[in-house]
Image (cartoon, grey):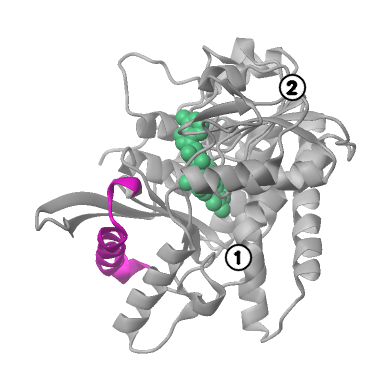
Amino acid sequence: MRTLTVPSTTPATIAPVSPGRQALDTALFQLGQAADRLDLDDSLRAMLATPRRSLTVSVPVRREDGRMDVVQGFRVQHNITRGPAKGGIRFHPRTDVHEVTALAMGMTWKCALAGIPYGGAQGGVSVDPASLSTRELERVTRRYVNEVLPIVGPERDVPAPEVGADRRTMAWIMDTYSVNAGYPLPGVTTGGSTTSGCAPERAEATARGVRFATLRAMCGSPEGRTVAIQGFGKVGAPTARHLADAGALVVAVSDSTGAVVNRSGLDVDGLRAWSKETGGVRGYREADPLSHDDLLELDVDVLVPAALEGAITEQNAPRIRAGLIVEGASCPTTPGADRVLADAGITVVPDILANAGGVIVSYLEWLQEAQARSWSAREVDARLRGLVENAFDTVAAVSAEGGITLRQAAHVIGVGRVAEAHRSRGL
Ligand code: NAD
């Protein structure tokens, strides 16, 4: 039998590996560090390092011109010991099974850290949604759902939109699932439209969580502090709005089209309108252009990576001048970069803490459904804030007590809770 080993030292870079493989190496490294600290035995380490279920499917796409392409799709359920699996669905050309496994693993620790009764999952389709017409994208989504249908569902595994997916994607998923079931099942996704049964608060929940985590890390005084945000999608754009509302000065933003800077503060709503109209932030007239790399290295108080994995590496980390990094994205910092940032005294609020807002509001959505109740947006926000701040304070206390980084502390808590659930269930 092949046994998976969990490394507890920084993964060596011997040959170039895919970004997805790098993300998985990072996830296994972080698990290994937490497992060492928790003194977990080898069998439990192997269990936690291995996804419970991993499904790879072929998704044929009939193009508008009649051609047939085939892309790969994935759904990985990393762990379901603490509850049904929960996790995003991503449409991106470089998505592979390693990336999806890494993100599913992060989701397991995130739910445990937030104290919500879900396991971790992630799905993905290796396609660029921008290269497809709306009808092609709908066909890919529906076919992907049909292929992964045996393992998803309201009681088993509930998807939400992630990179390259949105409310419309969730509506197609809900409809395809419901047609197969023979009756409407709005609970099959979260983060969809209100007409497909999802709470309106979910759309900006991840960004609200990033805001609460940022303010906690700043001890609540954001006025006039400067912020740069990498990524201007479902997480980055509303994060810019919420941090500006809190009094911070959002001076730079990037997306895949380019980066822009205005040291007096960007007009976030103006930039959102420009981006919607032109397809990206590039060329925004009320700001100066900037390179992608320069955005990460700006002299700002706070840097929010909110794009893809591996943005902050051992190479660019020494040039980062922000005093605080709040990870809106999943896995944006490599272990080598983490070491450099810690040595430089830069605080990093880790992804599994900073971007937990989305899954927390999904849980609140599910609670309301289960109790046939409806909370106001204000009540949902207050509960979200309470859960994020509580998780933040617990992580900060473990970090201070153990002399470890916030990331290490967050993993010790998340991994520790899942390990405890395994033990208590006798697995
Ligand atoms: P999205 O597709 O809505 O947005 C991604 C953004 O990143 C886009 O603006 C894109 O142009 C930009 N981008 C891509 N490559 C870039 C680059 N090289 N430089 C700068 N910008 C670049 O995706 P999203 O849902 O906002 O997710 C972003 C990150 O947040 C991902 O890491 C995801 O795992 C994480 N996350 C999302 C959620 C959620 O609720 N959507 C929850 C938790 C974590």
Q: Could you tell me which residue is drawn at 61 percent across and 45 percent down?
A: 272
Looking at the image, residue 363 sits to the left or right of residue 180; the answer is right
Please name whichever residue, 359 or 201, is drawn nearer the observer in this view of the structure. 201
Instruction: Using residue 221 as the reference point, say whether residue 325 is left or right of it.
Output: left
Residue 300, numbered label: 2
Which residues are the magenta region? 130-152
Say if 22 sits above or below 412 in the image: above
Crowding at mark 2 (Cα within 10 Å: few <14, some 14-19, many 20+): many
Judged from this view, the residue extending furthest toward the front is 285
- Of 80 and 216, nearer the camera is 216
Query: What's the residue type where badge 2 is placed?
Result: Val
Q: Real-space Cα distance between discs 1 and 2?
A: 32 Å
Is residue 299 left or right of 33 when viewed as pictured? Answer: right
Element under label 2?
A: loop
Circle 1 or circle 2, nearest the eye: 2
Q: SS class of the residue under badge 1?
A: helix
Q: Does residue 241 appear in this view?
A: yes
Where residue 260 sits: x, y (%)? 60, 27
Q: Position of residue 339 (x, y in %)?
A: 62, 17
Q: Which residue is mark 1?
A: 362
Q: Amino acid at mark 1?
A: Ser
Residue placed at 65% from the left, 27% from the top? 287
**Residue farthest toward the left in the current orientation of the protein:** 67
Q: Residue furthest bottom?
A: 183
Give percent across and percent down for residue 229. Answer: 63, 33
> Residue 80: within the magenta?
no
Q: Callout 1 environment at 10 Å: few (<14), some (14 to 19), or many (20+)?
A: many
Instruction: Indicate the quadrant where residue 128 lies.
Output: top left
